[in-house]
Amino acid sequence: MKPRILVVDDEPEIIELVEFNLKQAGYAVTTAADGAEALKKVRAQKPDLIVLDVMLPEMDGFEICKALRLDAATAKVPIIMLTAKAAEIDRVLGLELGADDYLTKPFSPRELMLRVKKILSRSQSEEKPKEQLRFGDLLIDLPRHVVAWKNKPIEMTATEFKLLTILAQRSGRVQSRDQLLRDVWEYDSLIDTRTVDTHMRRLREKIGPAAKHLDTVRGVGYRFVE
Amino acid sequence: MKPRILVVDDEPEIIELVEFNLKQAGYAVTTAADGAEALKKVRAQKPDLIVLDVMLPEMDGFEICKALRLDAATAKVPIIMLTAKAAEIDRVLGLELGADDYLTKPFSPRELMLRVKKILSRSQSEEKPKEQLRFGDLLIDLPRHVVAWKNKPIEMTATEFKLLTILAQRSGRVQSRDQLLRDVWEYDSLIDTRTVDTHMRRLREKIGPAAKHLDTVRGVGYRFVE
DNA sequence: CAATCCGGTGACAACCATGTGACGATTGGG
DNA sequence: CCCAATCGTCACATGGTTGTCACCGGATTG
């Protein structure tokens, strides 16, 4: 199930930018232009995360934040604040408001996506993902950032490691090049999909015999087979 | 049985927010507004954890902490300190006071909840963190704040010591620069991540041959290897 | 069977991450 | 009040990493 994200801002351009990027990344996005609408939608849709601009007409971000925190049904929803002034940071993160993170405008979509991902993974990780993946003689150790074949470590770059990990975690399921671009490269969709091929090649080269786990599904994408 | 938590602060808003969040999380919460009241309630209710503001009228947090530690009946209750100044941290965590953790204001409720959870799980499972770490000829003594190579002490600054300690305690696991910033520099995310590199360099210089334990994982972070 | 599509491959230039030395700013002690 | 220590930042060098492209052979399609 896609995580739901509510974006609250009164500037259409910002809404558009943020919404576009979030949807690209596979989130379900709804938007609100003012405080009243925001509160209503929060209660109706129970989003997993709220991106909240501080500067809003009538009820500002601070008030919305406070209101959300005081209602048991919404008190725990993580909030990322958008603020124009660095000076407001203390207030934002402070006890008074209790936002979970913040961004000062102007911000890059890249930064926002990183925070979103961080916050969501934090709150959703009730069940934590496996730390080690083992497929026969192939071992992938995530926290140690090590891949080994028959107990012999295989050197690889950060990108290759990530690519292999993503595929292995979804073992059996075919991943399209676009999917892989989104998950490994995180949103820089400016990148050519053929780049994935090149990385697959380099990955196969490095892991040698373990390359048998990496399947090409012609016309669709790649797949990790056990 | 719900864990009992005593919150000591003189600011009603802070009390309100902290109490609200803790109750949300399923703890039994009582509050106190000054030192005398706090001491009385500690003895009466034997809480499992105390959240204690440093800034209080009359008897401040430091004194309360000291008083609690001097009474055998209350000496072992874990304490989380709330402090406005980062400069007070050393005193708070030091032998003089022996708080179990601290937060600098402003902080997010989420942050507080994480610490509370951590402390409680630690004290309930009786599991103490190691006081000494040994890796071959390298010795790290936490309470004495000493690092030695082949029994010869190595001088280093507080930051370097903390950096080394954090890495060594998570030996094998790669720590990203951001992770290290959070854990070594504590929520001062204003700091450039490249600063970590500089400290790693100085640390490597000082520990000389032991630097072989410090791995760079390109594109990811640093790692301590045994 | 020919035209087309698709993925593998090698080369390469741009980029990026890291190590390193230096420089102010700050702090705490003498 | 000054000095030394420590810290965060910066600029620079360098070598690894990355994205792209052109080309090729095999698969697919009609």
Image (cartoon, coloured by chain):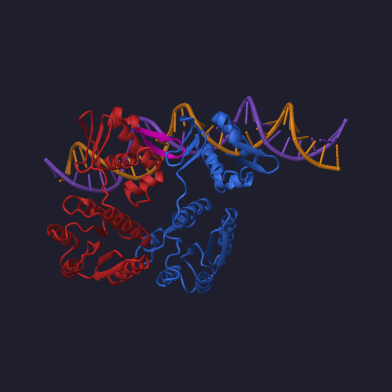
Chain colours: A blue, B red, C purple, D orange
Work out which quarter of the rendered image holds the C terminus of chain A and state it: top right
Q: Hey, which quadrant is residue B64 in on the image?
A: bottom left
The question of residue B76 being in magenta is answered with no
Q: Nearer the viewer, residue D10 or B195?
A: B195
Tell me which residue sits at (51%, 53%) in the image: A113
Report the magenta residues as a range.
B214-226
Front-lying residue, A127 or B56: A127
On screen, residue D24 above or below C3: above
Residue shown at the point (36%, 34%) measured from the top left: B225
Q: Is residue C19 above or below residue B126?
A: above
Q: Is residue B118 left or right of residue A106?
A: left
**B92 or D22: nearer the viewer:** B92
Q: Is residue A51 visible?
A: yes
Rendered-image quadrant of the N terminus of chain A: bottom right
Examine the rendered structure and indicate whether residue A33 appears above or below residue A127.
below
The residue under the point 42% across, 58% down is A101
Q: Disc count in the image?
A: 0
Rendering coords of residue B91 (x, y %)? 20, 52
Residue A216: give x, y in percent of width and height. 65, 38
Q: Is residue A192 visible?
A: no
User: Magenta residues: mostly which secondary structure?
Assistant: strand
x, y percent for residue A27: 56, 57
Residue drawn 40% across the image and 72% down it? A70
